[in-house]
Image (cartoon, rainbow, N blue to C red):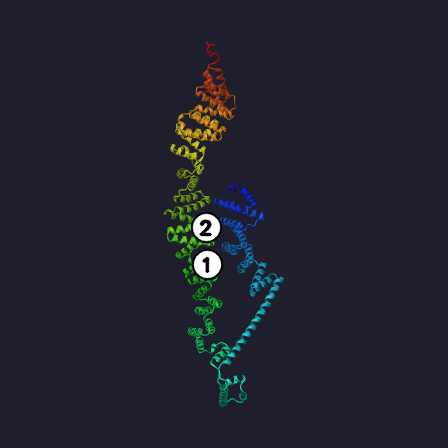
């Protein structure tokens, strides 16, 4: 976790991991520590760690694209959190390029579309995206962005690019428009001139070809009409003979054609033709007999299928007549019957009739389906699909839907058809059906359709909740998912369904941070419900807003909302305590302190101390004892010591406070404080129950470090305070041998010897102590005790000398009185005889 405590550390750590070749470890390290910073609300450092990782990978020329992808995705999420729009766009474009390198083109395109949808791109950003779209062949997307850029600035390179894309896509007319625009902007542009000339020549050639094709089609139709005419049975009329005159017939008939053709002559000619035909029949009868099987064989070999001329069919003519007179329905009905009749004997003719119906009534999907079925039965699937696709372009949404549903059965994997069905259902207002289609889309396509669908379901709770439930676990655009989940929460909230509204609020929160107002509404709902997990989520979210609030009064009000949720968590009590202290809510301060102490939340000991330190004197002994114990457990010895002193002011004989205070003074090793305490509170065996566990603790430490004088120093004083002087002597002597605290140790040994009635040893220790350099407080006590002992021994001179030296250092105890009461040197009585 070194990265959490210094920016230099994580650069060093990352560099070490990379140099060891542990790239995965470096990546995991950066992501983990970035997340830690994010949890702490330190987004700048969270981003810096990831940028450092990317920088080091580039510096060391390490091509670890999956690691870079993770880092960039995390950076983008962090920039979104702090609303750095330009950074979001910049890094998203970089990530899109990386995803393309990783063969995740569809993800890259989705990402680019997302930032285009969500943010307002400037022209430079759009140009970068155009380059990406062009590089992967997504020309329609590129052209849309080019047009948007050109609305803001006339970029000649983009105009040229658009022209080239359209030219290469064979959309010559549109390409020509761009190259002409380029020529206007840059009249000397040779490339534009060349392209304009080339496209115009191409278009002229295409037009000529179209004219030739049309002429060929007309000539072909004329020939077909002539062939049909030749196949028709002829009856000798004036018109017939004029036509027949153009065909090879009997010479005698040809000659007669030259004459004027009267009705009588026509009759004669008919008779001649009949005679000639009978003559031919006789010749045929004289030929050898041919068997039936031979006839069939011959027909099969020689006959060719002849295309039926629809105009020779009376029903067809009748249908056209109805249509010509405006009775389209009746005409189509006749044509359908006729086509149905031909289905069993001539499929092509049936299809031709059905096609005529589609010309008259393009929205007739049933006809398109019939053609499609006929073709499918014949195994002509591609043609069947063609007819259904044509019908699916109907402007009538119902007809279009029918065709699209049939197409879906043929090509179920075609998401474009699925998309059109979805849109058609919406157009028809069949929202439930649209939702059923929506469920069939891949995750990649789902986001775009959900965006379109939202406006149709946003006020319909029944269908909206179904959609939201469906997409909850889907990996789709988070912005779109959030829109649905949050709107579902809003509608349930309006319907006063508390359980469902809080459920969907939490779901929306899991996708994206909500507004403070939403969380406050959620807290209001939860006050009446026992949902601890949901309450914790709401509380944590409100807490994050509190951290951003600069007004302590508003922050306190928000904190109060959390407290009202009854979440038994010291974190919230501590924040409420801090805010209550800032705005002077003393009653709340005491209440929160009590809750923190009852949880034994020692991590907030300093906050508790700062909140109460001015008020210790106002508390009763029970409260003070509770506080002292809390601070002791928290390791805040100074606070515990301060409170114990306050207890002693109110109860001087409080053994617990006395012992704890003395222990603190000894552990600090403050000689002045130790002497001061011993002056006020003399040793007593009554403290043994409190002191002995502490002695045991330090004995264990001493056993681990037997030569450490600190433990001997503390143990010696603890024994001393419980009047176990003999034990104290051994420990104090060890400290002296270690050259530590020698003056004080001499003093303590003197007291121990004195209280064990070893006065000579006591005096000797005082003399040795006075020969050492100690702090003034120790020296004063040494001089004072030395003077008293000398006085008691009758050595007035030594006593006077010691007291005089002591008083030079200032007043001390009753030294002045002792000095004044010493007998003068002229009145000293010789213990061996009379007064001198």
What percent of the width, then of the height, locates residue 366? 43, 69
Q: Give the crowd class for mark 1: few <14, some 14-19, many >=20 residues within 10 Å.
A: some
Foreground pick, 790 / 476: 476
Q: Nearer the viewer, mark 2 or mark 1?
A: 1
Q: Earlier in the sequence, mark 2 or mark 1?
A: 1
Q: What secondary structure is marked by label 2?
A: loop
Can residue 744 be seen at all in this image of the molecule? no
Measured along the vertical axis of the image, is residue 258 above or below residue 94?
below
- Looking at the image, how many numbered discs can be counted on the residues? 2
Point out which mark residue 586 bears.
none
The x, y position of residue 56, in whole percent, is: 56, 46
Label 2 close to label 1 by CB (< 8 Å)? no
Q: Position of residue 406 (x, y in %)?
A: 44, 65
Considering only vertical position in the picture, is 63 above or below 425? above
| Residue of label 1 | 441
User: Could you tell me residue 608's position as x and y percent?
Assistant: 43, 37
- Quadrant of residue 624 in the image? top left
Measured Cα–Cα span from mark 2 to mark 1? 24 Å
- According to the picture, the residue beneath numbered tag 2 turns out to be 512
- Evaluate whether residue 601 shows in this view: yes
- Observer-nearest of 445 and 623: 445
- For this orientation, the residue located farthest to the top is 834
- How packed mark 2 is, by other alpha carbons closer than 10 Å (few <14, some 14-19, many 20 or more), is some
Residue at 40 percent across and 46 percent down: it is 533
SS at circle 1: loop
Q: Is residue 35 above or below residue 138?
A: above
The structure residue drawn at horizontal position 50% and vertical position 80%, both measured from the top left corner, is 231
């Amino acid at each position: 976790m070194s990265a959490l405590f210094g920016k230099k550390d994580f650069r060093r750590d990352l560099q070490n991991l990379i140099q060891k070749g542990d790239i995965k470890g470096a990546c995991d390290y950066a992501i983990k520590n970035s997340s830690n910073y994010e949890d702490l609300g330190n987004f700048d450092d969270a981003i810096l760690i990831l940028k450092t990782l990317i920088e080091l990978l580039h510096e060391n020329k390490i091509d670890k694209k999956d690691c870079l992808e993770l880092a960039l995705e995390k950076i983008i999420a962090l920039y979104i959190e702090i609303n750095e729009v330009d950074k979001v766009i910049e890094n998203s474009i970089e990530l899109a390029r990386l995803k393309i390198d990783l063969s995740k083109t569809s993800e890259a395109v989705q990402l680019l579309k997302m930032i285009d949808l969500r943010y307002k791109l400037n022209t430079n950003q759009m140009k970068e995206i155009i380059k990406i779209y062009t590089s992967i062949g997504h020309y329609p997307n590129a052209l849309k962005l080019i047009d948007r850029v050109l609305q803001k600035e006339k970029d000649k390179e983009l105009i040229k690019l658009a022209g080239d894309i359209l030219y290469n896509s064979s959309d010559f007319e549109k390409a020509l428009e761009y190259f002409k625009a380029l020529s206007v902007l840059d009249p000397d542009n040779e490339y534009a001139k060349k392209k304009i000339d080339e496209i115009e020549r191409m278009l002229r050639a295409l037009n000529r070809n179209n004219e030739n094709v049309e002429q060929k089609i007309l000539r072909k139709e004329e020939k077909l009409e002539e062939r049909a005419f030749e196949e028709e049975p002829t009856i000798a009329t004036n018109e017939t003979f004029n036509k027949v005159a153009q065909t090879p017939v009997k010479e005698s008939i040809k000659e007669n054609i030259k004459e004027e053709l009267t009705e009588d002559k026509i009759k004669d000619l008919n008779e001649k033709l009949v005679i000639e035909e009978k003559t031919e029949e006789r010749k045929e009868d004289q030929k050898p007999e041919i068997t039936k099987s031979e006839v069939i064989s011959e027909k099969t070999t020689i006959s060719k299928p002849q295309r039926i001329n629809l105009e020779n069919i009376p029903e067809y003519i009748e249908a056209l007549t109805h249509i010509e007179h405006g009775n389209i329905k009746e005409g189509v009905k006749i044509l359908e019957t006729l086509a149905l009749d031909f289905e069993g004997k001539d499929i092509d003719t049936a299809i031709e009739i059905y096609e005529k119906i589609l010309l008259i009534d393009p929205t007739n999907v049933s006809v398109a389906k019939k053609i499609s079925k006929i073709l499918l039965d014949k195994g002509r699937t591609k043609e069947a699909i063609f007819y259904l696709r044509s019908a699916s372009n109907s402007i009538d949404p119902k007809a279009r839907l029918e065709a699209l549903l049939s197409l879906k059965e043929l090509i179920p994997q075609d998401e474009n058809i699925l998309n059109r069905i979805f849109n058609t259902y919406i157009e028809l207002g069949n929202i439930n059906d649209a939702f059923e289609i929506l469920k069939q889309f891949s995750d990649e396509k789902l986001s775009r359709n959900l965006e379109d669908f939202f406006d149709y379901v946003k006020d319909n709770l029944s269908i909206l909740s179904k959609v939201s439930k469906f997409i909850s676990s889907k990996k789709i655009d988070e912005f779109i998912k959030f829109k649905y989940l949050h709107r579902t929460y809003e509608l349930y909230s309006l319907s006063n369904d508390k359980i469902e509204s809080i459920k969907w609020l939490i779901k929306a929160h899991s996708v994206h941070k909500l507004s403070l107002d939403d969380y406050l509404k959620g807290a209001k709902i939860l006050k009446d419900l026992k949902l601890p997990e949901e309450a914790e989520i709401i509380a944590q979210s409100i807490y994050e807003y509190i951290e951003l609030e600069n007004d302590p009064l508003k922050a306190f009000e928000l904190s109060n909302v959390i407290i009202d949720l009854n979440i038994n968590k010291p974190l919230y009590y501590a924040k409420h305590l801090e805010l209550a202290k800032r705005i002077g809510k003393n009653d709340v301060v005491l209440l929160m302190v009590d809750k923190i102490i009852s949880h034994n939340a020692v991590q907030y000991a300093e906050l508790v101390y700062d909140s109460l330190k001015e008020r210790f004197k106002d508390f009763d002994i029970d409260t003070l004892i509770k506080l002292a114990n809390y601070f002791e457990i928290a390791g805040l010895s100074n606070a515990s010591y301060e409170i114990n002193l306050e207890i002693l002011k109110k109860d001087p004989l409080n053994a617990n406070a006395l012992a704890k205070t003395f222990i603190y003074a000894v552990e600090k090793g403050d000689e002045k404080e130790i002497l001061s305490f011993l002056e006020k509170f003399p040793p007593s065996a009554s403290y043994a129950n409190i002191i002995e566990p502490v002695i045991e603790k330090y004995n264990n430490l001493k056993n681990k470090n037997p030569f450490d004088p600190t433990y001997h120093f503390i143990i010696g004083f603890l024994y001393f305070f419980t009047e176990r002087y003999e034990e104290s002597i051994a420990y104090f002597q060890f400290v002296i041998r270690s050259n530590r605290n020698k003056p004080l140790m001499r003093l303590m040994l003197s007291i121990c010897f004195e209280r064990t009635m070893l006065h000579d040893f006591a005096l000797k220790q005082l003399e040795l102590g006075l020969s050492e350099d100690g702090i003034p407080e120790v020296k004063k006590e040494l001089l004072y005790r030395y003077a008293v002992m000398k006085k008691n021994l009758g050595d007035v001179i030594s006593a006077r000398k010691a007291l005089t030296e002591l008083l030079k250092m200032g007043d001390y105890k009753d030294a002045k009185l002792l000095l004044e009461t010493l007998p003068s040197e002229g009145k000293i009585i010789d213990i061996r005889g009379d007064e001198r």
